[in-house]
Image: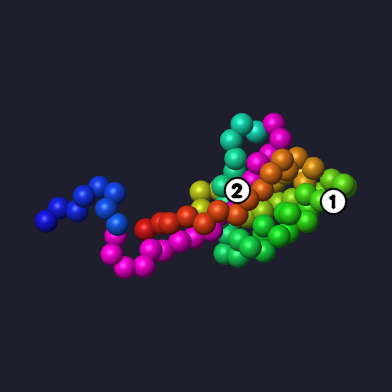
């Protein structure tokens, strides 16, 4: 029997978390995957509150190998949980 498109899958579904970064002057958000995304999210959240500019350099896993930006350029930040295979 053929499985219908969009039919629920059997068993537990794997999920991963991504840190999504919105930068001022950038049209699209930056999606980054880390081994410990909660810690990176908390660190970037603290840097957003700081009035002094700090150069941030991150090395996420996945398609983005290295990212550098100034903390005052962060427009928004979120932690997203997504299913994957």
Residue 20 is one of the magenta-drawn residues = yes
Q: Extreme right residue here? A: 52
What element does badge 1 sit on? loop
Classify 10 Å Cα crowding around label 1: few (below 14), some (14-19), many (20 and above). few
The quadrant of the rendering that contains the N terminus is bottom left
Using the image as rendered, state which of residue 56 and residue 17 is in the foreground: 17
Give the residue drawn at x 87%, y 47%: 51
Give the residue drawn at x 21%, y 50%: 4
Q: Is 60 on the left or on the right of 63, as rendered?
A: right
Q: Which residues are magenta?
A: 9-25
Q: Mark number for residue 63?
A: none
Q: Is 16 on the left or on the right of 13, as rendered?
A: right
Q: Extreme front residue here? A: 8
Task: Say if residue 65 shows up in the picture.
Answer: no
Quarter of the image for residue 9 reads bottom left
Tell me the residue that label 1 is attached to: 50
Earlier sequence position, callout 2 versus callout 1: 2
Tell me the residue that label 2 is attached to: 20
The quadrant of the rendering that contains the C terminus is bottom left
Quarter of the image for residue 8 reads bottom left
Using the image as rendered, state which of residue 6 and residue 73 is in the foreground: 6
Query: Where is residue 82 shown, x and y percent of the image?
Result: 47, 55
Location of residue 76 with respect to 59 vertically, above or below: above
Q: Is 4 on the left or on the right of 35, as rendered?
A: left
Give the residue drawn at x 84%, y 45%: 53
Q: Extreme left residue here? A: 1
Query: Where is residue 7 shown, x and y percent of the image?
Result: 27, 53
What element does badge 2 sit on? strand
Location of residue 28 with respect to 38 vertically, above or below: above
Task: Say if residue 81 shows up in the picture.
Answer: yes
Classify 10 Å Cα crowding around label 2: few (below 14), some (14-19), many (20 and above). some
Mark pair 2, 1: CA separation: 19 Å
């Amino acid at each position: 029997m053929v499985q219908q498109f969009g039919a629920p899958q059997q068993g537990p579904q794997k999920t991963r978390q991504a840190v999504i970064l919105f930068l001022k002057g950038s049209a699209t958000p930056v999606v980054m995957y880390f081994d410990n995304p909660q810690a990176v999210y908390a660190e970037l959240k603290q840097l957003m509150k700081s009035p002094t500019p700090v150069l941030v350099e991150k090395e996420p896993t996945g398609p983005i190998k290295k990212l550098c930006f100034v903390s005052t350029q962060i427009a928004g930040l979120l932690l997203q949980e997504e299913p994957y295979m």
